[in-house]
Amino acid sequence: EPCMMHGACVSRTDRYVCNCAARYSGNNCEIDNGSPCEHNPCQNGGVCKEDTKGDYSCQCPFGFIGNLCESEVTHRLCENNPCHNNGTCHTLAGGSRYECTCQPGFTGKDCEININECLSDPCQHGGTCIDGINSYTCFCGRTIGYTGTNCELNINECENNPCLNQGTCFDTYGSYTCECAEGLGGQNCELNLNECSSDPCLNGGRCEDSVGSYTCHCHSGFAGINCEINVNECDSVVCPPNSECVDRINKHQCVCKPGYAGIPPNCTETDSCASSPCLNGGSCLPHVDGYDCSCPPGYTGKVCQVNLDECTSSPCQNGGTCIDGINGYKCNCTADFMGANCELDYDVCFLEPCQHNGTCITKASQKEYYCDCIPGFEGKDCEVNINECLHAKCPDRKVCVDGINTYECRCPLGYSGDNCTLMIDFCALSPCLHNGTCREATGNYTCNCPSGYTGKHCETDVNECNLDKNICNHGICVNNEGGFECFCRPGFSGDFCDVDFDECLSDPCRNNATCENKINGFNCICTPGYTGQDCGININECESNPCMNGSTCLDAIATFSCICPPGLTGRLCETNIDDCESSPCLHGGLCIDGINSYSCNCNDTGYEGIHCEINIDDCKNNPCSNGAMCKDLIKDYECECYLGYTGKNCEVDILECVSNPCKHGGTCLERSNQSYYENNDTSDSLPSIFKEPFSYDIANGYECVCVPGIVGLNCEININECESSPCLHGTCKDGIGGYTCKCHNGFEGLHCEIDINECLRYNPCVNGICRDQRGPGYICDCPPLYGGMNCSVELMGCKENKCLNGGTCKPYLENETIHKYNCTCPSGFYGASCEQLTTMSLNGDSFVITNTSRDEGYDIHFSFKTTLPNGLLAIGKGSTFYILELVNGRLNLHSSLLNKWEGVFIGSQLNDSNWQKVFVAINASHLVLAANEEQTIYPINLNEGASPGATSFPTTYLGGTTPYLKRLTHGPPSFIGCTQDVYINGQWVRSLEL
């Protein structure tokens, strides 16, 4: 027993290890450190108790458990820790319910719910919220233009000066705008605008684009920024007498001055007025240089050919139509207006329709009216005199005569006097009004009324307008005293507006033109060579530029003639040498023939240059977006997009997150969103790819930010937190982002790490001391007379059984029902009842031989006593050997396994007639020799390739040996003395004398 009976020996392949009791330490548990309870290792008031082996246990106070009383007692409701996510379980008053105190970020009865901090929508301005444990992260994104913990800060997108080419940046919310210098465009002023796209170069000039501008390359004969100036070749030319220089395209021509005819230098004077050039009655005034025309009012122009259009100043207001006349105009008004220039709102009261001083009042439309009549009149136009006699009473013999708002009682016609008895001459009083003729009759008279009046006294004006609504055919009827008046619409005349006004009567058509009368107008059918409303304009057949190729046109009446420059001929100078015949324009350019020249129109070919020989670089303005490479083509370009982008210009970012690929509530982040890369110094929640600088090489695709407990490209994998075996003494059940432990019997805690102290919780030992075991269970250290699992059974095994030779009887219980006993034998005895004697007396002529088998290793325990200083104690024989002898009162061990010839010595005065304990142990690496409390260990020397059995000794000799083996002993005498308790390789040895 190398561990000195103070620990458990654990054998290894090449050595042994002693697991010492708490009191002891050292390689062989040889050091006594004193009681382990001296330092009171028990916590929370626990009482330390040392046992006979030198170990200790803690007797815990109520409410605490654990080997050191370190854990508070857990109620049975909290035994399996129902609180998830490291929540703490507490029993409530009464012990029938429990509650969980959750870690920050969790809630629910069992802390099973991860509080979603994103539910309060903390991320402002459209930021994306990603929930964490007791936290959240806002991903703002450059696209929405905000930053900060909650995306509350507006990002100044102008801070990095995104506008190129000296563009001015204006920050907006979530974006910016660039005010570009002239000639530049694009979001960042990166595009050079093609100022040539509007074809600014005139007269066939070729446009060359540049940054913010363009340059026109003009054909010969033209100049100016846009080739708009015809170079006046006459500036350096002097023409012959009586002729003048006429500028042409890229040339000049000398022609005779007005008043002269012929071809220079042969210009002869002519009568410039002979042909009566002045039109429309203009007077011709000849002079040296030609003639001048003095035009009548309403005409202008070189030959008075232009009728001044008085309508050009738009005199007619409110939508009125202006009709030009000779030295004047007329306005045809819409239905809502009136006046010479239609400047007045149409007012029906303007025509004074109300009679008898009635007041005309217009209605809202201005086209309707009503009359406010003076007392005594009524009717729509106050045309009816109210007959007051209808309700009047006159004395006898008198009759009632109606008046204006009154009446009078008069004698009947033909009578007078107070009593109306006198006959009178009726006509003498001129009773007939309005020049009516009075005719006397017996006792009465009649009035013959003139046209327009009626009534007994011709007192009533006849309203002809009411009698015949169409009396004014093409006009408006206005009633007046004794008649009516028609106000005609434009183009009509006559008393009844029934006469179409013949505008041809004024002979408006000039130059023998035929006048055709129209309603409210006329039409002139001109003779050949003239035009205009009144055919007063000599058609300038040269205005259409019939003479081609820069030839000079001479106008005549209804014809013209062309004076061709050299190299051209034909009536129109239309025949020109075709300079395009050699097809000088390349790549489909259109050749435009000129006068002794040509030009190439390269439009829509994709080429430029004088001969369309230069391929236009369509990539020049960098049309491709998102880092794409531009490939120039003919009339086109092609953008080679990075993966994740599409569109003609790669301007469309393919949004991979639209399909919601991230499972289990994961947040999808577009790899192309550059704002995520800008946050790489502030957030550890982003996938690792966003820690790198942004590159279009990695912009394709998406990244999923998974909720805790979920992994995988698409957050499709629920992490099995149970793989790490977190439940020390229990079964793990995986969840989303966590796990729960179902503890084995005897354990509790979040990870089943707490060994339940059944001794404290259940106090199971009836008559003994309870010792808690690791894991489920306990041991009851019973008092001597009790046994059973709970020390509840009185032991009966020693009552009828005796241990011999001074052995001590210890009863025990088997299977809780069978009473048995064990005998602890004193030295010199062994056996179930200590009936076997182990003490042997050796007299020098006797020895003991025993055979034991073990594959490798060897150990022997025994005690001896003698008074002689020398003697052979034991020999072990196998493929090797050892010899143990007493030399001069010391223990000496020789072996072929040792490198020491003299062997190993230990102890002194071992021949003092007292019992001496001896222990020898040999394994593949060490040899142990102990005498009483003294011990020494030596390494052994096995030859390379030796078998493990080299340390096994099947035969052991005690006290002497055979003559054959005497030669190994170097002559020591046989042992004379006593031995006892010989124990070899686990077997007791009895004496056998040879």
Image (cartoon, helix red, strand yellow):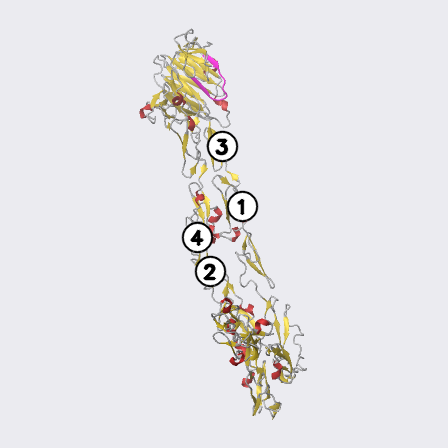
Residue under pointer 1: 660
Q: Label 3, label 4: how many angstroms apart (C-alpha)?
A: 43 Å
**How far is disc 1 from disc 4 in space, using C-alphas?**
24 Å
Q: Nearer the viewer, residue 971 or 228?
A: 228
Mark 3 touches mark 4? (CB < 8 Å): no
Work out how far the residue at label 2 is from the one at label 4, CA to CA, in angstroms: 16 Å
Magenta range:
848-860
Question: Which image quadrant is residue 845 in?
Answer: top left
| Mark nearer the N terminus (3 vs 2) | 2
Amino acid carrying mark 1 in the image: Asn
* Label 1 neighbour load within 10 Å: few <14, some 14-19, many 20+: few
Q: Which mark is residue 860?
A: none
Asked if labels 4 and 2 touch by Cβ distance under 8 angstroms, the answer is: no
Figure quadrant of the N terminus: top left
Q: Is residue 647 magenta?
A: no
Label whose residue precedes the other's in the sequence (2 or 4) = 4
Q: Is residue 340 visible?
A: no
The stretch drawn in magenta includes residue 853: yes
The x, y position of residue 406, in whole percent, is 47, 71
Give the residue at mark 3: 733
Q: Position of residue 813 (x, y in %)?
A: 44, 13
Dot 2 surroundings within 10 Å: few (below 14), some, or many (20 or more)? some
3 or 1: mark nearer the eye: 1
Which residue carries the number 2 mark? 177
Residue placed farthest to the left in the image? 38
Label 2 is placed on what type of residue? Answer: Thr
Instruction: Give the residue pinned by disc 4.
Output: 146
